[in-house]
Image: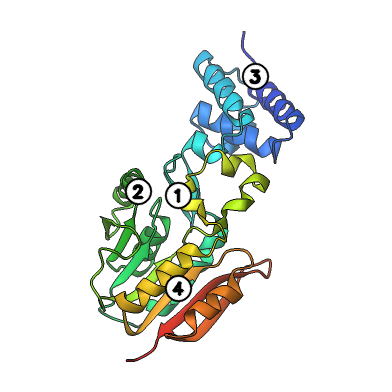
Protein backbone atom coordinates (compact mmCIF):
# COMPACT_ATOMS: atom_id res chain seq x y z
CA UNK A 1 0.00 0.00 0.00
CA UNK A 2 1.29 3.44 -0.93
CA UNK A 3 0.71 6.80 0.70
CA UNK A 4 -2.28 8.90 -0.13
CA UNK A 5 -1.78 12.21 -1.88
CA UNK A 6 -2.47 14.07 1.36
CA UNK A 7 0.02 11.97 3.34
CA UNK A 8 2.67 12.33 0.63
CA UNK A 9 2.27 16.10 0.69
CA UNK A 10 2.54 16.20 4.47
CA UNK A 11 5.64 14.01 4.53
CA UNK A 12 7.32 15.94 1.72
CA UNK A 13 6.59 19.26 3.38
CA UNK A 14 8.02 18.03 6.70
CA UNK A 15 11.20 16.71 5.06
CA UNK A 16 11.79 19.97 3.19
CA UNK A 17 10.96 22.08 6.21
CA UNK A 18 13.50 20.25 8.40
CA UNK A 19 16.13 20.88 5.70
CA UNK A 20 15.28 24.61 5.70
CA UNK A 21 14.23 24.53 2.06
CA UNK A 22 12.30 27.73 1.26
CA UNK A 23 8.49 27.50 0.82
CA UNK A 24 8.43 23.78 1.70
CA UNK A 25 4.69 23.25 1.20
CA UNK A 26 4.61 24.86 -2.22
CA UNK A 27 7.76 23.00 -3.24
CA UNK A 28 6.25 19.68 -2.15
CA UNK A 29 3.11 20.46 -4.15
CA UNK A 30 5.07 21.34 -7.29
CA UNK A 31 7.23 18.21 -7.06
CA UNK A 32 4.25 15.95 -6.41
CA UNK A 33 2.42 17.47 -9.37
CA UNK A 34 5.44 16.74 -11.52
CA UNK A 35 5.56 13.15 -10.29
CA UNK A 36 1.84 12.66 -10.90
CA UNK A 37 1.67 14.71 -14.12
CA UNK A 38 -1.21 16.77 -12.77
CA UNK A 39 -2.19 20.32 -11.80
CA UNK A 40 -2.14 21.51 -8.18
CA UNK A 41 -5.92 21.57 -7.96
CA UNK A 42 -5.95 17.83 -8.61
CA UNK A 43 -3.97 17.20 -5.41
CA UNK A 44 -6.76 18.58 -3.28
CA UNK A 45 -9.63 17.16 -5.30
CA UNK A 46 -8.06 13.69 -4.95
CA UNK A 47 -6.30 13.99 -1.60
CA UNK A 48 -7.40 10.53 -0.45
CA UNK A 49 -6.19 8.75 -3.59
CA UNK A 50 -3.18 6.49 -3.27
CA UNK A 51 -0.06 7.33 -5.24
CA UNK A 52 0.92 4.87 -7.93
CA UNK A 53 4.24 3.11 -7.50
CA UNK A 54 5.69 5.13 -10.37
CA UNK A 55 4.54 8.46 -8.90
CA UNK A 56 5.91 7.54 -5.48
CA UNK A 57 9.33 6.65 -6.91
CA UNK A 58 9.55 9.88 -8.89
CA UNK A 59 8.33 11.99 -5.97
CA UNK A 60 11.01 10.53 -3.71
CA UNK A 61 13.69 11.20 -6.31
CA UNK A 62 12.54 14.79 -6.79
CA UNK A 63 12.57 15.41 -3.04
CA UNK A 64 16.12 14.05 -2.78
CA UNK A 65 17.25 16.25 -5.66
CA UNK A 66 15.75 19.31 -3.99
CA UNK A 67 17.42 18.41 -0.69
CA UNK A 68 20.76 18.34 -2.54
CA UNK A 69 20.23 21.99 -3.47
CA UNK A 70 19.02 21.47 -7.02
CA UNK A 71 16.52 24.23 -7.84
CA UNK A 72 12.92 23.14 -8.30
CA UNK A 73 12.92 24.61 -11.82
CA UNK A 74 15.75 22.32 -12.88
CA UNK A 75 13.86 19.33 -11.49
CA UNK A 76 10.61 20.12 -13.28
CA UNK A 77 12.38 21.76 -16.25
CA UNK A 78 9.84 24.60 -16.12
CA UNK A 79 9.90 28.27 -15.23
CA UNK A 80 7.09 30.71 -15.88
CA UNK A 81 8.11 34.00 -17.46
CA UNK A 82 5.82 36.66 -18.89
CA UNK A 83 2.86 34.31 -18.62
CA UNK A 84 4.49 31.39 -20.44
CA UNK A 85 6.33 28.26 -19.34
CA UNK A 86 9.92 27.97 -20.54
CA UNK A 87 11.99 24.81 -20.55
CA UNK A 88 15.14 25.19 -18.45
CA UNK A 89 18.04 23.02 -17.40
CA UNK A 90 21.48 23.62 -15.91
CA UNK A 91 22.75 24.99 -19.25
CA UNK A 92 20.71 28.17 -18.79
CA UNK A 93 19.98 30.71 -16.10
CA UNK A 94 16.53 30.41 -14.54
CA UNK A 95 14.52 33.44 -15.76
CA UNK A 96 13.64 35.79 -12.89
CA UNK A 97 10.38 37.71 -12.50
CA UNK A 98 12.39 40.95 -12.21
CA UNK A 99 13.59 40.52 -15.79
CA UNK A 100 10.01 40.97 -16.97
CA UNK A 101 10.60 44.71 -16.42
CA UNK A 102 13.18 44.53 -19.22
CA UNK A 103 10.69 42.88 -21.58
CA UNK A 104 8.09 45.53 -20.72
CA UNK A 105 10.59 48.30 -21.51
CA UNK A 106 11.45 46.68 -24.85
CA UNK A 107 7.80 46.25 -25.85
CA UNK A 108 7.04 49.86 -24.88
CA UNK A 109 9.95 51.22 -26.95
CA UNK A 110 9.01 49.15 -30.00
CA UNK A 111 5.39 50.30 -29.98
CA UNK A 112 4.72 52.37 -33.10
CA UNK A 113 8.15 51.73 -34.62
CA UNK A 114 8.48 49.78 -37.87
CA UNK A 115 11.41 47.92 -39.50
CA UNK A 116 13.41 47.73 -36.29
CA UNK A 117 16.32 45.32 -35.92
CA UNK A 118 16.29 43.92 -32.36
CA UNK A 119 19.09 41.86 -30.82
CA UNK A 120 18.99 40.12 -27.44
CA UNK A 121 22.57 39.48 -26.30
CA UNK A 122 23.16 36.60 -23.88
CA UNK A 123 19.76 35.08 -24.52
CA UNK A 124 20.15 31.95 -22.36
CA UNK A 125 16.78 30.17 -22.36
CA UNK A 126 15.52 32.66 -24.95
CA UNK A 127 12.87 33.96 -22.53
CA UNK A 128 13.45 37.65 -23.31
CA UNK A 129 13.70 37.34 -27.10
CA UNK A 130 10.80 34.91 -27.39
CA UNK A 131 8.58 37.03 -25.12
CA UNK A 132 9.34 40.16 -27.15
CA UNK A 133 8.68 38.36 -30.44
CA UNK A 134 5.37 36.97 -29.23
CA UNK A 135 4.22 40.22 -27.62
CA UNK A 136 5.03 42.37 -30.65
CA UNK A 137 4.77 39.98 -33.61
CA UNK A 138 8.28 41.00 -34.72
CA UNK A 139 11.33 39.07 -35.79
CA UNK A 140 13.96 39.19 -33.03
CA UNK A 141 17.59 38.13 -33.22
CA UNK A 142 19.24 36.57 -30.18
CA UNK A 143 22.78 35.49 -29.41
CA UNK A 144 24.71 33.56 -26.79
CA UNK A 145 28.27 32.35 -26.33
CA UNK A 146 26.97 28.97 -25.10
CA UNK A 147 25.92 26.43 -27.71
CA UNK A 148 24.02 24.30 -25.16
CA UNK A 149 22.10 27.42 -24.10
CA UNK A 150 21.20 28.17 -27.72
CA UNK A 151 19.85 24.62 -28.07
CA UNK A 152 17.53 25.24 -25.12
CA UNK A 153 16.51 28.64 -26.51
CA UNK A 154 15.66 27.06 -29.86
CA UNK A 155 13.60 24.39 -28.11
CA UNK A 156 11.58 27.14 -26.43
CA UNK A 157 11.26 29.01 -29.73
CA UNK A 158 9.80 25.93 -31.38
CA UNK A 159 7.36 25.43 -28.51
CA UNK A 160 5.79 28.82 -29.19
CA UNK A 161 6.60 29.10 -32.90
CA UNK A 162 8.22 32.45 -32.13
CA UNK A 163 9.92 34.50 -34.82
CA UNK A 164 13.40 34.43 -33.28
CA UNK A 165 16.69 33.87 -35.08
CA UNK A 166 19.68 32.65 -33.06
CA UNK A 167 23.41 33.06 -33.54
CA UNK A 168 26.42 31.94 -31.55
CA UNK A 169 28.64 34.86 -30.58
CA UNK A 170 30.64 36.39 -27.75
CA UNK A 171 28.62 39.56 -27.10
CA UNK A 172 28.65 41.62 -30.33
CA UNK A 173 31.63 40.03 -32.09
CA UNK A 174 29.47 38.73 -34.97
CA UNK A 175 27.36 41.87 -35.41
CA UNK A 176 27.92 44.31 -38.27
CA UNK A 177 28.57 47.98 -37.34
CA UNK A 178 25.48 50.15 -37.27
CA UNK A 179 23.10 47.25 -37.86
CA UNK A 180 21.07 47.25 -34.64
CA UNK A 181 18.17 49.57 -33.76
CA UNK A 182 17.52 48.08 -30.32
CA UNK A 183 20.04 46.15 -28.27
CA UNK A 184 18.69 44.24 -25.28
CA UNK A 185 20.65 42.34 -22.67
CA UNK A 186 20.49 40.81 -19.22
CA UNK A 187 24.26 40.37 -18.93
CA UNK A 188 26.26 38.55 -16.25
CA UNK A 189 26.81 41.05 -13.44
CA UNK A 190 27.69 39.16 -10.26
CA UNK A 191 31.19 39.93 -8.88
CA UNK A 192 33.30 36.82 -8.49
CA UNK A 193 33.93 37.58 -4.84
CA UNK A 194 30.19 37.29 -4.12
CA UNK A 195 30.13 33.58 -4.94
CA UNK A 196 30.78 32.53 -1.35
CA UNK A 197 27.72 34.44 -0.12
CA UNK A 198 25.29 33.23 -2.78
CA UNK A 199 22.54 30.69 -2.22
CA UNK A 200 23.85 27.23 -3.03
CA UNK A 201 20.95 26.74 -5.45
CA UNK A 202 22.39 29.54 -7.57
CA UNK A 203 26.13 29.12 -7.01
CA UNK A 204 26.26 25.35 -7.39
CA UNK A 205 23.68 24.82 -10.13
CA UNK A 206 23.23 27.80 -12.44
CA UNK A 207 25.79 28.32 -15.24
CA UNK A 208 28.63 30.55 -14.07
CA UNK A 209 29.11 31.99 -17.55
CA UNK A 210 25.65 33.56 -17.21
CA UNK A 211 26.18 34.71 -13.62
CA UNK A 212 29.68 36.02 -13.04
CA UNK A 213 31.16 38.96 -14.90
CA UNK A 214 34.60 39.14 -13.31
CA UNK A 215 36.15 40.59 -10.20
CA UNK A 216 33.95 43.70 -10.00
CA UNK A 217 30.78 42.50 -11.76
CA UNK A 218 31.09 45.38 -14.23
CA UNK A 219 33.37 43.78 -16.80
CA UNK A 220 30.62 42.59 -19.17
CA UNK A 221 28.83 45.93 -18.97
CA UNK A 222 32.08 47.62 -20.02
CA UNK A 223 32.60 45.32 -23.00
CA UNK A 224 28.97 45.40 -24.04
CA UNK A 225 28.59 49.17 -23.91
CA UNK A 226 31.85 49.68 -25.78
CA UNK A 227 30.78 47.28 -28.55
CA UNK A 228 27.26 48.71 -28.62
CA UNK A 229 28.72 52.09 -29.48
CA UNK A 230 29.67 50.53 -32.82
CA UNK A 231 26.86 48.03 -33.43
CA UNK A 232 23.89 50.23 -32.54
CA UNK A 233 22.75 52.83 -35.06
CA UNK A 234 22.80 56.53 -34.14
CA UNK A 235 19.54 57.21 -32.26
CA UNK A 236 19.26 53.48 -31.60
CA UNK A 237 18.41 52.27 -28.12
CA UNK A 238 20.23 50.14 -25.56
CA UNK A 239 18.25 48.44 -22.77
CA UNK A 240 19.97 46.38 -20.08
CA UNK A 241 19.13 44.80 -16.76
CA UNK A 242 21.04 46.29 -13.84
CA UNK A 243 22.89 44.37 -11.18
CA UNK A 244 22.91 45.26 -7.52
CA UNK A 245 24.72 48.57 -6.91
CA UNK A 246 25.83 48.83 -10.55
CA UNK A 247 23.76 51.84 -11.60
CA UNK A 248 26.28 54.64 -11.05
CA UNK A 249 29.13 52.76 -12.72
CA UNK A 250 26.95 51.90 -15.71
CA UNK A 251 25.82 55.54 -15.98
CA UNK A 252 29.46 56.60 -16.20
CA UNK A 253 30.14 54.05 -18.94
CA UNK A 254 27.23 55.46 -20.95
CA UNK A 255 28.15 59.12 -20.51
CA UNK A 256 30.44 59.51 -23.53
CA UNK A 257 28.31 58.12 -26.37
CA UNK A 258 24.79 57.77 -25.00
CA UNK A 259 22.00 60.14 -24.04
CA UNK A 260 18.35 60.04 -22.85
CA UNK A 261 19.31 57.73 -20.00
CA UNK A 262 16.28 56.25 -18.25
CA UNK A 263 16.22 53.99 -15.18
CA UNK A 264 13.28 51.73 -14.35
CA UNK A 265 12.91 50.36 -10.81
CA UNK A 266 11.37 47.03 -9.86
CA UNK A 267 8.48 46.56 -7.45
CA UNK A 268 10.88 46.65 -4.50
CA UNK A 269 12.22 50.02 -5.61
CA UNK A 270 15.61 48.74 -6.81
CA UNK A 271 16.98 50.13 -10.12
CA UNK A 272 16.37 47.20 -12.46
CA UNK A 273 16.57 48.39 -16.09
CA UNK A 274 18.63 51.12 -17.71
CA UNK A 275 17.97 52.50 -21.17
CA UNK A 276 20.02 54.91 -23.28
CA UNK A 277 20.02 56.30 -26.81
CA UNK A 278 23.16 56.37 -28.92
CA UNK A 279 24.16 59.91 -29.79
CA UNK A 280 24.03 60.99 -33.40
CA UNK A 281 27.45 61.14 -35.04
- Please tell me which residue is depicted at 42% across the width and 55% down the height of the picture: 127
Instruction: Specify whether 209 is left or right of 33.
Output: left
State the residue position of label 3. Answer: 4
Proximity of marks 3 and 4: CB atoms separated by less than 8 Å:
no
Classed neighbour count for the residue bearing mark 1: other residues with Cα under 10 Å, few (<14), some (14–19), many (≥20): some
Q: Where on the picture, by quarter, is residue 91?
A: top left
State the residue position of label 1. Answer: 209
Q: Is residue 211 above or below residue 51?
A: below
Classed neighbour count for the residue bearing mark 3: other residues with Cα under 10 Å, few (<14), some (14–19), many (≥20): some
- Residue farthest to the left, as pictured: 176
The numbered mark at residue 114 is none
Distance of label 4 from label 2 (alpha carbons)? 21 Å
- Residue 44 % position (x, y): 64, 33
Q: Earlier in the sequence, mark 3 or mark 4?
A: 3
Q: Please, what secondary structure does the residue beneath circle 4 have?
A: strand
Is residue 111 shown to the viewer in this render? Answer: no
Instruction: Specify whether 273 is left or right of 167.
Output: right
Distance of label 3 from label 4 (alpha carbons)? 50 Å
Q: Please, what secondary structure does the residue beneath circle 2 have?
A: loop
Proximity of marks 2 and 1: CB atoms separated by less than 8 Å:
yes
Amino acid sequence: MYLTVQAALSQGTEILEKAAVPVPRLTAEVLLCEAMHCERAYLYAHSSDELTRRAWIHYGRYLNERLSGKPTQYITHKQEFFGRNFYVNTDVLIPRPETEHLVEAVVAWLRGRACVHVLDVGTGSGAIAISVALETGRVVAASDISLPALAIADRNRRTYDARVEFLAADLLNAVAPGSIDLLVSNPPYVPGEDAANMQREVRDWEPHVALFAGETGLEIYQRLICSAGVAVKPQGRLLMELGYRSIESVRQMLAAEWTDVEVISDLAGWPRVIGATRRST
